[in-house]
Amino acid sequence: MDLDVIVPTYNRAPLLERAVRSLAETARPEGLRVTITVVDNRCTDGTDKLLARLTTDYPGQLRILYERRRGKSRSLNLAIQSSTAELIGMIDDDEEIHHCWFREVFTAFQDESLEFIGGPYVPLWSSAPPDWLPQEYLAVVGAADNGREPLDYSPSFPGILKGGNAVIRRRTLLAAGPYAEFLGPSDTARLLSCEDEDMYLRLLKAGARGRYLPSLVIYHHVPIERLSPEYYRRWCFWRGISRGLMDSSHRLPVPYLGGVPRFLYGRAARGFLRVVKNKLRREGWEAAFSDELSVWDLAGFFWGRHIYTLARFSPVRSRRRTSHHAE
């Protein structure tokens, strides 16, 4: 069984080193051959020197690719298209795998009918998490836990397959098509996202069989800059933009108003009223912070659906991109 673990990276050399060493030094079961593919996405922080050193430290284990066009989705597509492995694994450059990760992958894919797997994210805090962190927005810090029992991925699954802890059969990925390059972190929008959600929904629509495995664990480093209200607001706004951008491909089965799911208006209105009440009572902003974030969710979706789309795909921007690639 051949597994190619893809690690896209952009200017996170110290964390990338930990991620690669985690993959290279974790025991593999007999019968599982592993390649670690790092995609340098125009890094400027000495990542190239680090990769040269890691290639020497782990001869025959690393494959280095370079993607000049900024964007996580582009990096993933390059690595997938150039791989020949039966299985494609994906982790982010700020993660480390559990010591049983490879064993869980090998065991799971003994089932020939299984086409993709995912698992939980355990946060590694750079500092103690503040008391105000909203539990319903843990994805902001890269934490995810869907319980202690294995579950089938389906429309009723309480979450999605996240691309920082995923293994998918390459034939399944190729059939689903490439990652959407207008989604995900890019040179102009580091907090643009939903490339994983778009792929996950396409896998389900194609009838691919997936399984959530609580024993397939990765550890995600949470930098201190994510532990601020400002970061949460920006993250929610950009996730809303991302969902607005992909809405034309994955329209929700709910009533819409002005191109936006109607429930987002209701949730934002209720949240706004609770924020106002808290201010009138002179209570701290923490008490209604999750309510405030629902307003940013709505604002982002509306912006992505009606405004960001026009700016991103305008004829002027298209001509600039064409000219840049020609150079």
Image (cartoon, rainbow, N blue to C red):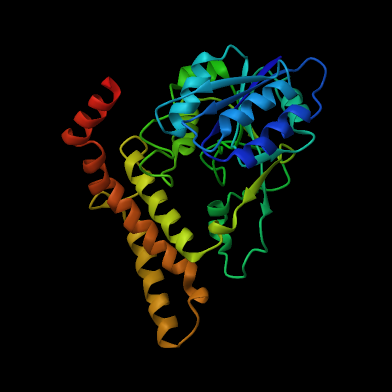
Q: Is residue 142 above or below residue 52?
A: below
Instruction: Give x and y (percent) for residue 317.
Output: 22, 35
Q: Residue at x 53, y 39 (%)?
A: 11
Specify whether residue 116 is in view.
no
Extreme-left residue of the structure: 315
68 with respect to 257 (left or right): right
Q: Residue at x 48, y 30 (%)?
A: 41
Specify whether residue 133 is in view.
yes
Which of the 4 image quadrants contains residue 134?
A: bottom right
Instruction: Give x and y (percent) for residue 79.
Output: 52, 21
301 with respect to 316 (left or right): right
The C terminus - image quarter: top left
Q: Residue at x 43, y 47 (%)?
A: 191
Out of 62 and 87, give the one closest to the viewer: 62
Instruction: Give x and y (percent) for residue 201.
Output: 46, 34
Which of the 4 image quadrants contains residue 213?
A: top right
Extreme-bottom residue of the structure: 281
Out of 153 and 89, give the one closest to the viewer: 89
Q: Is residue 193 above or below residue 211?
A: below
The N terminus - image quarter: top right
Instruction: Give x and y (percent) for residue 271.
Output: 41, 69
Out of 184 and 66, give the one closest to the viewer: 66
Q: Is residue 140 above or below residue 323?
A: below
> How many numbered marks have been drawn onto this rendered protein structure?
0
Which of the 4 image quadrants contains residue 248?
A: top left
126 with respect to 191 (left or right): right
